[in-house]
């Protein structure tokens, strides 16, 4: 507007339009370049020129493979009759030869002395596997995705690499963008912020979940329903807010006295006490 305040106008497919101050819009920018608001090129359109060239090359390779397959189904040889025959006799000979091919089960076709089969030596060149793999990986590298992720046969290490490469920075960007727009400068000065915890997105095997729960349970770091959810079980109402921890803990500087049988207070916090501390 005249005062220099920026607005964002939205157009929806049902014809609805609305205008919102840009300060009220949570805007997460990703892969932006020349255009500071829309990303991509100067017009705000995705800059996929390099990717489109690679996709076009991949299309040509696939078309070449299809043509090579069709060529392999074409005429593969000729039958030469070492005599002069009329057009009618030629048609009859072709029909008989096709019938022999159609009814053949052994792979051998008997011919008389007048006929001679001359096969064509056709060398169909198919694109080699390393070239196809290079093109596929070049396309996937644009999005940071490996073939293992695409095929779904990834290992834990491969998923962690995918998470760190493609997901983690976006999750942080969302939390920062929401913190910027949902809190005032004073609220942010007091440490208020939006945090996203993507624990459900992190790949863990059953054995790794058991190990994690075994480490956190004694310290009271997990609610009972969180343990159930980790194994795909529904949370129970009677376990809502319930959390247990082990009492077999002692301060490090008192460990020796404890082992020697001295009467000391074990540094442990009960569930009710921990709740009171949280409320405070």
Image (cartoon, helix red, strand yellow):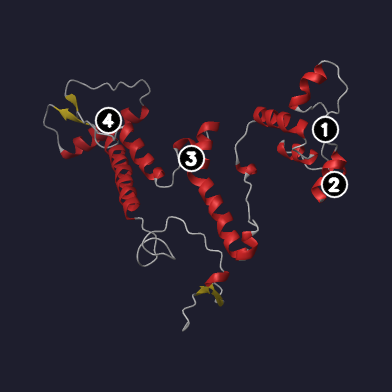
Mark 1 or mark 4: which is in front?
1
The disc, 4 or 3, on the residue closer to the chain's N-terminal end is 4
State yes or no: discs 4 and 3 in contact (Cβ < 8 Å): no
Q: Eyeballing the image, is 106 above or below 179?
A: above
> Which circle marks residue 97 in the picture?
4
Q: Is residue 108 left or right of residue 77?
A: right
The disc, 2 or 4, on the residue closer to the chain's N-terminal end is 4
Mark 4 or mark 3: which is in front?
3
The x and y percentages for residue 189 are 62, 60
Q: Measure the alpha-carbon separation of dots 1 and 4.
A: 94 Å
Q: Measure the alpha-carbon separation of dots 4 and 3.
A: 49 Å
Q: Measure the alpha-carbon separation of dots 2 and 1.
A: 14 Å
The disc, 1 or 4, on the residue closer to the chain's N-terminal end is 4
Q: Measure the alpha-carbon separation of dots 2 and 4.
A: 95 Å
Q: Eyeballing the image, is 160 above or below 113?
A: below
- Residue 54 visible in the snapshot: yes
State yes or no: discs 2 and 4 in contact (Cβ < 8 Å): no
Q: Residues within 10 Å of mark 2 (few under 14, many from 20)?
A: few
The x and y percentages for residue 148 are 48, 35
Name the residue carrying label 2: 276
Mark 2 or mark 3: which is in front?
2
Q: Is residue 5 left or right of residue 128?
A: right
The disc, 2 or 1, on the residue closer to the chain's N-terminal end is 1
Name the residue carrying label 3: 150
Q: Residue 261 versus residue 86: which sits nearer the camera?
A: 261
Name the residue carrying label 1: 268
Q: Quadrant of residue 270?
A: top right
Residue located at (28% from left, 42% from top):
64
Q: Secondary structure at mark 2?
A: helix
Q: Secondary structure at mark 3?
A: helix
């Amino acid at each position: 507007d005249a005062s220099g305040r920026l607005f964002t106008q939205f157009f929806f497919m049902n014809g609805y339009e609305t205008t919102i101050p840009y300060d009220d819009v949570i805007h997460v920018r990703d892969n932006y370049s020349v255009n500071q608001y829309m990303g991509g090129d100067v017009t705000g359109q995705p800059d996929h020129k390099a990717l489109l060239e690679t996709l076009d090359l991949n299309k040509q390779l696939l078309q070449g493979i299809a043509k090579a397959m069709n060529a392999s189904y074409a005429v593969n040889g000729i039958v030469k009759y070492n005599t002069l025959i009329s057009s009618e006799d030629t048609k009859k000979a072709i029909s008989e030869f096709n019938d022999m091919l159609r009814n053949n089960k052994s792979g051998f076709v008997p011919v008389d002395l007048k006929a001679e089969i001359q096969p064509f030596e056709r060398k169909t060149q198919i694109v080699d596997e390393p070239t196809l793999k290079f093109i596929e990986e070049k396309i996937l590298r644009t999005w940071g995705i490996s073939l293992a992720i695409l095929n779904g046969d990834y290992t834990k290490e491969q998923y962690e690499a995918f998470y760190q490469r493609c997901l983690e920075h976006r999750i942080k960007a969302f939390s920062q963008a929401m913190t910027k727009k949902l809190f005032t400068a004073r609220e942010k000065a007091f440490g208020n912020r939006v945090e996203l915890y993507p624990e459900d997105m992190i790949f863990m095997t059953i054995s790794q979940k058991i190990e994690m729960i075994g480490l956190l349970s004694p310290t009271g770091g997990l609610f009972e329903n969180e343990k159930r959810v980790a194994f795909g079980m529904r949370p129970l109402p009677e376990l809502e807010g319930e959390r247990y921890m082990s009492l077999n803990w002692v301060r490090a500087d008192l460990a020796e006295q404890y082992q020697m049988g001295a009467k000391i207070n074990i540094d442990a916090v009960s569930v009710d006490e921990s709740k009171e501390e949280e409320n405070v």
